[in-house]
């Protein structure tokens, strides 16, 4: 890449960090500042890395969620999708299947779960909320039935080493999710598919007349969400060394919260990759800070609620009305 | 005595745009005052200030000499202002009557909505323009023209002192305008001040004695229309003389599209015709005669139940607009807001939506080339303001239309289907679009133009199909083309009510 | 060598809580500044709050500060992991964890090992790699209730189970213990075993439906006390309180109150306060360098109206020591 | 009421039972038929009453949810609102406050919770999903903090008798919720407020221009939802004899599912009282039938997911596309 194009693509990137993202960034800075002042050691490198690592799974899911939300949908089934993908690829590994193959199978499960959601939404025309509410139970049940409710233990160390490694001093999970974020940013900003997502969520009828492949676009969004749920699952089971059928409980709420804090509109047609990542880090920093402050769990819950509201308010104020 | 309505130095700033700059003029009681200007001149913005939707950055509105603060639509209504908005402002799931009384329903015992009473009063108001509209029908089942009539009738209900009409006839036919004109003159006779915005100059000349002409947010002049020719008014609007346009034909014998026995599930019945390279084919007909549906079949937006379409002699089957676009067919739809634009996206994105793949030969969009093409196409259609990255929703309706025409130019579409292409578009831009359509024909495109404005059809078309009740009632070539001839074929021959176009 | 995956119910390397002092002597002296961190499932259930009371009580007794945290809700797996990771980074000398699931705190085992901090798995879900476990035998909860039925309802009859959250270790084990024991006895039929999701309302509805279908039911076993108290209301509403015995698990104070009032038939108390005390003691002995067996078993007792007083309040410890001595 | 008006209002009622509601009804009939065939005694009067009783709490919440959804919003905080209202009025009763007063206080709490949601949505302009996600945590935390996590026991028998009584052979809870449904139906179909709800959700800009009090309409919808959550809480604590701070967990999902099965569109502007009630009964019948069949818990979860999807599909098919 020549210097000139580098400068140009940096400028483009900065334009990508829109006003709206600046609002989210201010929210993050405020929260970091508050915890930094209250918690000694909050800004220690080790702790900052911790925050990133603890945010990485939610960020991964939230990226997929952002694409789905932009397309005008919602995916409540990410947690069970992750669980199903996790237990199937884990049990393959335990049965001796080479782990790249098992991971690929896990991804395939994620894609398949997304495909079912997408087809029910795009071709059958059901409401996304209710479709994924239905598959939320269904996929969870499948994971439980498949395992009989037991965790799958004994994942091969080779597999675990992959996901527990680190690169340039950052946990590999963080690096992977950062790469996913870059890809998602490029997809949204630089590819026809990204434009299609924004158009389908922004005005489906107009997109249809303009020749946008509506159904394919929506299905692809759900499949990406499923795939990223499967990726999150692999990261998690790599970390935990076990896959459980009840893994991923309530993940959807955190993912939606991150996307919404980052500026995605649940009405569709609007959302930002940078914002979503910032949103996930806001939530991660908050959990981390509250824990380090030893806040009792009821008050942590209170703080969680209030900080979600505060993040939205800060953003609202810095951005002005409308 | 002070005038009924007076604008004093009204300015309105939007981020990066000065939409109005010191606008002052007045309208007397009983006066029908035209408000003219190109797309984006600021007409709608001014009327939105009058109706309390926007607040002015500076200046004031006076009613009967007293300054009024119009903080919201309720305040404006209380001050005696009724408004017909350019974009239809309706709730599709509520009935016609419910929409007309929305925000101030009639009640029974102060608790229940008096539906029957509302429907009766709504029917009264509708009767003046179109008695066939059922006040109890859900609004969403009405066609655009009927919905526009509902908007007008709603404004009549209010018995306001000032009625502002922002392009009330953009979807109406001349005969419907006639009835509306009677209603408006009736209002004026009762002492109501009417502000009338339209791009159809003949209408403005027909009912207004005075008019204010705006350009780029400022008042050019308030004039007496009796003293001026249409040409002079146009010159004031656009700031230059418009050349008198002549019809030029570029039609060839090469058939590009041929339809045989096309029928749709609802309206279109057994339509057959050929469209030639370089030809501009006009389609005329009454509202509800099935023209829009025919275009949607040709564009792949709806499925035909019978019949065939062939492009360049090869049979084509369209399952979605995507297939039609691939075959080189593109539709400029009738309802711009609903079917045309993606409001939050930029002009560039909206333009490129149909040809994204072309701009992304290797998967990634070549933004440099996209920008260059957008700049080129948008200057060809003369977009104003020329801000390619601005969300399209912030542009005036006319400029939105230009971006959508640009969409098909960018996609290299060979067969262009225009449904009411100049609805809501100013004279200057209209001339540009006519010119554009002719250029496209000359370049070897084939063009279909559906229009309810007969002068437009006559100006543009090499040949006209007249539709009636979903079928082609007549084919007129230029030698036989006249408004009378079209009207004669468009109106059902048998004068029984059953043959009237369906209206529910 | 790697440890075999832990099964807390069957592990051979175990010791009963009552024997610890006898085998390992009086409580040892701790390094200066020792502090303990504990994380449990949730504080929305009295059981886990009582466990915390046990920790704090014992901590106060031996002068060790204890930080006790919990996830925001049951099932918040990653939130609990975040808390535990925070505790490791903050340099606590020993960690007591009650994981949401068998696996969600796994990374802690490695991080703590790296930081040379012993980890004690306290109750409920069992981390397979856990080197130390303090708690009761989950399966035994169900077994004890089943034995009550076998002894007190010699004619047998229909019984029903209301389970906790699907797939949760404690629920699976308790259900299985009850079901297999009572089925083996021959005269009983488990006519229903349905999910109550740890939720009072769900259990109430489930019990209503079961009673309506089987009015001749003789008893319910619920995986925890909250659900059991919901079932009691359903039984009362059906007017069957004299015919249907209802058992819970955990021994929360409301269960005791209900037992004394003659509504709930019984519960299996696993003495969370005592468990907390024993767990912290075990943890601190580890800090002091003692080599304890892998599992320290804590007591359980079936509580009914007859013995409720004996096992509640300050006398509980003494009663349990007596039981332990009698059992030897 | 004269005969003529009776006939007319019957006809109007039938118009109210729209095509869409007929679809939901068919879904219900199919599900009832299946369970009736599989479960002996499913159609026993006693069991049918059971189903109604068990559906009543969800129906109560779902009615409020329907109004909020019609206004273009969503209320995820119904469960915690109910919990807060329950523990506060229960602890007042236990402290000796006469129970009508305590009930009134509970209702006031519900209204206040709804007010907060409504103001944040309507005046501050935040997204409903994220506002109520924030208050979901906040209200729950308040309930937990207020009670220290303990249930409030010992409700006065007089209070319990009220909610456990029956009228014309129907449990009082069912009668109360039926009355609420009738009122909701009248409000939606016959009053200006009902029109405003449909208008605000259907086309907010048009509603604003027409002079509809947007903010007030939205706030009222959330307050009604809060009030009905409080009512549901009273019914529940009357039945259980205890108020727990964790009561109402996941109620929002059931309520949304009932509304959506009943035809409410999460895009706003659309929803039906009759449909919602049918939707709640579908869910109630399903739970009841699965329990009576003694389906193992994993398979119950599976059935729950599949039946939600099936109900939507049946409705889709009977109604045709669009
Ligand atoms: N909400 C807004 N934000 C920013 N700019 C706006 C907004 N509304 C209108 N504008 C700009 O103000 C100018 C005047 O627009 P307006 O809609 O009043 O024009 P108009 O005369 O009604 O045009 P047309 O004939 O096409 O309806 C245009 O440049 C338009 O882009
Ligand atoms: N949204 C709609 N819902 C129901 N019917 C519709 C709708 N839009 C159109 N129709 C029906 O299709 C018929 C043909 O309408 P179409 O729009 O094709 O006529 P048109 O000649 O293009 O009229 P216009 O000049 O208004 O566009 C109408 O009579 C109408 O009944
Ligand atoms: Mg305008
Ligand atoms: Mg048309």
Image (cartoon, coloured by chain):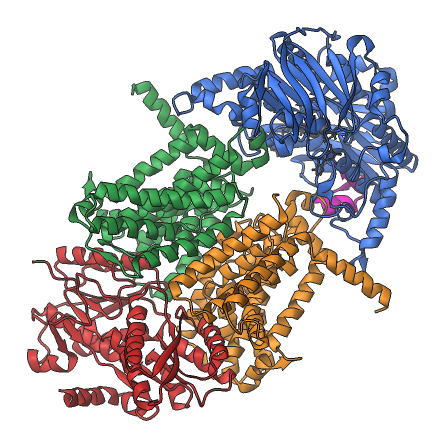
Chain colours: A green, B blue, C red, D orange
Query: Which residue is rendered at x = 55% and y = 71% of the image?
Result: D51
- Of residue A271 and residue B316, the one placed in the foreground of this image is B316
State which quarter of the image contains the N terminus of chain B. top right
Residue farthest bottom in this picture: C306
Task: Please state if B479 lies on the left or on the right of D34 as rendered.
Answer: right
- Is residue B365 within the magenta segment? no
The image shows residue C89 at horizontal and vertical percentages of 21, 56
Vertical order, B94 against B412 (above or below): below
Q: Is residue A24 visible?
A: no
State which quarter of the image contains the C terminus of chain B. top right
Q: Quadrant of residue D28?
A: bottom right
Vertical order, D61 against A52 (above or below): below
Vertical order, B324 against D112 (above or below): above
Give the magenta part as a residue range.
Answer: B65-84
The image shows residue C208 at horizontal and vertical percentages of 49, 77
Rendering quadrant holding ligand 2: top right
Residue farthest right in this picture: B189
Query: Which residue is rendered at x = 75% and y = 18% of the image?
Result: B465
Vertical order, B103 against D173 (above or below): above
- Of residue C234 and residue A138, the one placed in the foreground of this image is A138
Task: Please state if C196 lies on the left or on the right of B399 as rendered.
Answer: left
The image shows residue B371 at horizontal and vertical percentages of 48, 20
């Amino acid at each position: 890449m020549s210097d000139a194009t580098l400068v140009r693509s940096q400028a483009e990137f900065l334009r990508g960090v829109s006003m709206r993202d600046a609002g989210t960034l201010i929210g993050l800075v405020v929260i970091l500042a508050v915890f930094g002042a209250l918690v000694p050691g909050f800004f220690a490198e080790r702790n900052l890395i911790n925050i990133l690592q603890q945010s990485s799974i939610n960020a991964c899911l939230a990226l997929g969620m952002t694409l789905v939300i932009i397309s005008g949908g919602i995916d409540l089934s990410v947690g069970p999708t992750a669980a199903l993908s996790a237990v199937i690829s884990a049990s393959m590994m335990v049965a001796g299947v080479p782990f790249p193959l098992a991971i690929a199978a896990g991804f395939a499960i994620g894609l398949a779960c997304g495909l079912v959601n997408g087809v029910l939404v795009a071709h059958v025309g059901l409401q996304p909320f209710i479709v994924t509410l239905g598959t939320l139970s269904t996929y969870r049940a499948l994971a439980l039935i498949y395992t009989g409710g037991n965790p799958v233990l004994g994942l091969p160390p080779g597999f675990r080493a992959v996901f527990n490694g680190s690169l340039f001093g950052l946990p590999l999970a963080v690096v992977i999710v950062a790469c996913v974020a870059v890809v998602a940013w490029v997809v949204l900003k630089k590819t026809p598919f990204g434009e299609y997502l924004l158009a389908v969520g922004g005005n489906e009828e107009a997109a249809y007349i303009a020749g946008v492949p509506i159904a394919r676009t929506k299905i692809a969004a759900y499949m990406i969400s499923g795939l990223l749920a499967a990726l999150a699952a692999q990261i998690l089971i790599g970390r935990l060394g076990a896959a459980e059928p009840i893994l991923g409980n309530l993940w959807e709420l955190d993912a939606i919260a991150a996307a919404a804090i980052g500026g995605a509109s649940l009405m569709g047609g609007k959302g930002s990759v940078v914002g979503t990542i910032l949103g996930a880090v806001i939530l991660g920093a908050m959990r981390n800070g509250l824990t380090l402050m030893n806040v009792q769990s009821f008050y942590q819950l209170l703080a969680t609620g209030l900080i979600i509201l505060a993040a939205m308010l800060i953003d609202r104020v810095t951005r002005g009305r409308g | 005595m002070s005038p009924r309505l007076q604008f004093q130095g009204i300015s309105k700033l939007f981020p990066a745009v000065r939409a109005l700059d010191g606008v002052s003029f007045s309208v007397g009681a009983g006066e029908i005052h035209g408000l003219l200007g190109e797309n984006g001149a600021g007409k709608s913005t001014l009327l939105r200030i009058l109706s309390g939707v926007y607040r002015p950055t500076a200046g004031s509105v006076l009613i009967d000499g007293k300054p009024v603060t119009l903080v919201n639509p309720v305040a404006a209504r209380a001050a005696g202002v009724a408004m017909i908005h350019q974009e239809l402002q309706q709730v599709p799931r509520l009935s016609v009557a419910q929409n007309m009384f929305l925000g101030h329903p009639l009640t029974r015992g102060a608790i229940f909505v008096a539906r029957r009473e509302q429907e009766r009063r709504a029917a009264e108001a509708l009767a003046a323009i179109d008695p066939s509209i059922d006040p109890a029908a859900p609004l969403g089942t009405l066609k655009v023209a009927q919905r526009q009539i509902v908007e007008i009738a709603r404004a009549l209900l209010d018995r306001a002192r000032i009625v502002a009409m922002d392009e009330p006839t953009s979807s109406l036919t001349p005969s419907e305008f006639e009835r509306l004109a009677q209603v408006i003159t009736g209002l004026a006779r009762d002492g109501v001040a009417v502000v009338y915005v339209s791009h159809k100059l003949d209408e403005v000349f027909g009912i207004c004695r005075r008019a204010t002409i705006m350009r780029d947010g400022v008042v050019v002049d308030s004039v007496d229309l009796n003293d001026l020719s249409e040409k002079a008014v146009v010159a004031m609007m656009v700031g230059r003389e418009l050349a008198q346009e002549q019809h030029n034909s570029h039609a060839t014998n090469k058939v590009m599209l041929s339809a045989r026995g096309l029928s749709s599930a609802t309206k279109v019945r057994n339509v057959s015709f050929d469209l030639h390279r370089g030809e501009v084919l006009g389609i005329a007909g009454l509202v509800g005669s099935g023209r829009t549906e025919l275009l949607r079949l040709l564009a792949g937006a709806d499925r035909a139940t019978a019949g065939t379409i062939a492009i360049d002699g090869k049979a084509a089957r369209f399952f979605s607009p995507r297939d039609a676009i691939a075959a080189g067919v593109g539709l400029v739809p009738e309802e711009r807001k609903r079917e045309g634009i993606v409001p939050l996206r930029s002009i560039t994105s909206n333009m490129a939506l149909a040809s994204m793949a072309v701009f992304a030969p290797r998967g990634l969009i070549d933004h440099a080339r996209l920008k260059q093409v957008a700049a080129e196409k948008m200057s060809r259609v003369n977009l104003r303001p020329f801000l390619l990255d601005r969300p399209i929703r912030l542009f005036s309706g006319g400029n939105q239309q230009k971006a959508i025409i640009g969409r098909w130019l960018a996609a290299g579409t060979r067969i262009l289907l225009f449904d009411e292409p100049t609805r809501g578009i100013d004279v200057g831009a209209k001339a540009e679009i006519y010119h554009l359509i002719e250029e496209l024909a000359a370049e070897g495109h084939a063009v279909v133009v559906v229009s309810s404005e007969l002068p437009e059809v006559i100006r543009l078309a090499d040949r006209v199909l007249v539709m009636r009740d979903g079928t082609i009632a007549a084919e007129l070539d230029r030698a036989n083309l006249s408004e009378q001839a079209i009207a004669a074929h468009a109106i059902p021959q048998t004068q029984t009510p059953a043959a009237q176009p369906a209206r529910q | 060598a790697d440890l075999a995956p832990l099964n807390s119910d069957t592990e051979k390397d175990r010791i009963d809580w009552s024997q610890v002092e006898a085998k390992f002597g009086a409580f040892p002296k701790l390094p200066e500044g020792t502090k303990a961190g504990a994380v449990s499932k949730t504080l929305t259930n009295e059981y886990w709050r009582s466990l915390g009371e046990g920790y704090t009580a014992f901590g106060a007794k031996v002068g060790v500060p204890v930080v006790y945290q919990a996830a925001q809700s049951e099932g918040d797996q990653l939130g609990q992991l975040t808390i535990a990771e925070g505790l490791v980074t903050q340099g606590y000398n020993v960690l007591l964890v009650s994981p949401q699931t068998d696996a969600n705190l796994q990374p802690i085992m490695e991080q703590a090992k790296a930081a040379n901090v012993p980890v004690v798995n306290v109750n409920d879900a069992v981390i397979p790699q856990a080197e130390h476990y303090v708690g009761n035998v989950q399966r035994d909860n169900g077994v004890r209730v089943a034995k009550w039925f076998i002894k007190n309802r010699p004619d047998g009859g229909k019984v029903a189970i209301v389970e906790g959250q699907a797939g949760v270790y404690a629920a699976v084990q308790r259900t299985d213990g009850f079901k297999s024991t009572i089925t083996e006895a021959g005269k009983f039929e488990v006519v229903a075993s349905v999910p109550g999701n740890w939720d009072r309302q769900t259990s109430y509805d489930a019990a209503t439906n079961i009673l309506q279908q089987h009015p001749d039911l003789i008893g319910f076993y619920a995986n925890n006390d909250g659900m059991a108290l919901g079932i009691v209301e359903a039984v009362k509403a059906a007017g069957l309180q004299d015919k249907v015995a209802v058992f819970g698990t955990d021994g929360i104070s409301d269960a005791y109150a209900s037992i004394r009032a003659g509504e709930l038939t019984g519960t299996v108390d696993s003495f969370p306060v005592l468990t907390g005390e024993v767990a912290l003691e075990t943890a601190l002995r580890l800090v002091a360098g003692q080599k304890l067996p892998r599992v320290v078993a804590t007591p359980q007792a079936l509580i009914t109206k007859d013995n409720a007083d004996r096992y509640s309040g300050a006398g509980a410890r003494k009663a349990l020591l007596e039981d332990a001595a009698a059992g030897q």
